[in-house]
Amino acid sequence: MNKKILVAILALAALFLVYYLMMRPKPVAVEVVRIEPGEVKATVSNTRVGTVKACRRALLAPATGGEVARIHVKEGDTVKQNQLLMEVWNKDLKAQLELQEAQIRADEATAEQVCQLKGSAEREARRISLLQQHNQIVSEEQVDTKVTGAKAQRASCRAAQEAVAVSRASRNAVQAAVEKTLVLAPFDGTVAEINVELGEFVTPSPTGIATLPAIDLLDVSCLYVSAPIDEVDAPQIKTGMPACVSLDAFPDKRCSGSVSRIAPYVLEKEKQARTVEVEVKLTDPGELRDLLPGYSADIEILLASKPRALRVPAEAVLEQNKVLVMEEDGLLVERRFTRGLANWSTVEVLSGLQAGDRVVLSVGQEGVHAGAYAVAKNDPA
């Protein structure tokens, strides 16, 4: 080969190289992350916002209608179990109660008198019977009269004692009527709301018609979150599983809890996904101080976890468990992997990828696809 031909070949090769470099697409800048071991948790979360609720809540009202005579508490007060909260006008019933107490005392005195006479008549009957047995001059008629009188006094004593029992039962009936006019705290708690005023007339709620309670009592020492879980995720949840609670009112606060109840039915609402209501009880007393029933909250239930598992960010995963891996020369290659535990942030890699692989995070960016060339904005070591 002569020198001119060699020069021509080299010139053509140089022109081709220049053309290739000029026409080659400019590498796209992407964010990448190296796959490495770490903790992976499988969790499920609520589909719609949940609500903080009190473990015990009582909507209280008197058992009988009447005029509100006394309100012994105000909103925000802390009360003890059986403390009197409100009273409907009941002076007539209290007067009847006093009358019944007086009647009991009178009947008890009468019973004591009659029973004393019974004892005297029985002793007299025994004496006259002994005289007759010792051949004393005592007629049969006298003995019969004394014995019969003793029996009559015995019956009178029993009747007087039963009269006392009747009076006490009447007193108890009036006492029960008085108690129906009182509203007592069924447990230690905090008065959340009072919906009556002095002098108002209150009546029990008719069957099937909801009315405002006279007093709303909450036990804020025990709180739980009730939230809907998609029916697809619900079968994996068991009572006792640990859960984490986040609240919109406290963005930086995360509360610990455990699953305390799973509804035994699927909730069906029009135009909404079918869900199962799950309750998570907050287990740390120190986390309850600033919480109030009614706060919106989200729950994240831990199904399983691995402390050291190969993992990939969930945002890098494409359909059919695929990711884009950047080779050493910048070429983007699509790879499929087998997934294990997963949550909203990370996915466990069981096979198909290796530690150190550079996975593309910018999967939605224009120009990012298998076969393209890229450079890493952040070249992780």
Image (cartoon, rainbow, N blue to C red):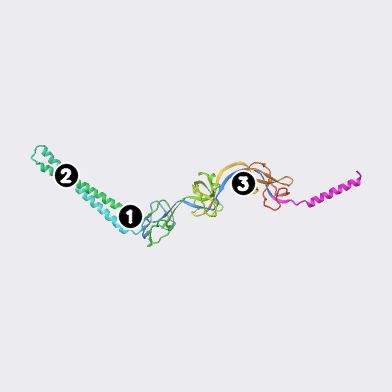
Q: Are the residues tagged 1 and 3 within 8 Å (C-beta)?
A: no
Whole-percent x and y of residue 277?
51, 49
On the picture, is 95 further left or further right than 125?
right
Q: Which residue is mark 2?
A: 150
Amino acid residing under circle 2: Ala
Whole-percent x and y of residue 221?
46, 50
Callout 3: helix, strand or loop? strand
Q: Which residue is mark 1?
A: 177
Q: Which residue is mark 3?
A: 346
Disc 2 from disc 3: Cα separation: 96 Å
Label 2 neighbourhood size at 10 Å, few (<14), some (14-19), many (20+)? many
Q: Are the residues tagged 2 and 1 within 8 Å (C-beta)?
A: no
Q: Which residues are magenta?
A: 1-30
On the picture, is 190 further left or further right than 152?
right
**Front one among 328 and 219:** 328
Q: Which mark is residue 216?
A: none
Give the mark, 2 or 3, whose residue is nearer the N terminus.
Answer: 2
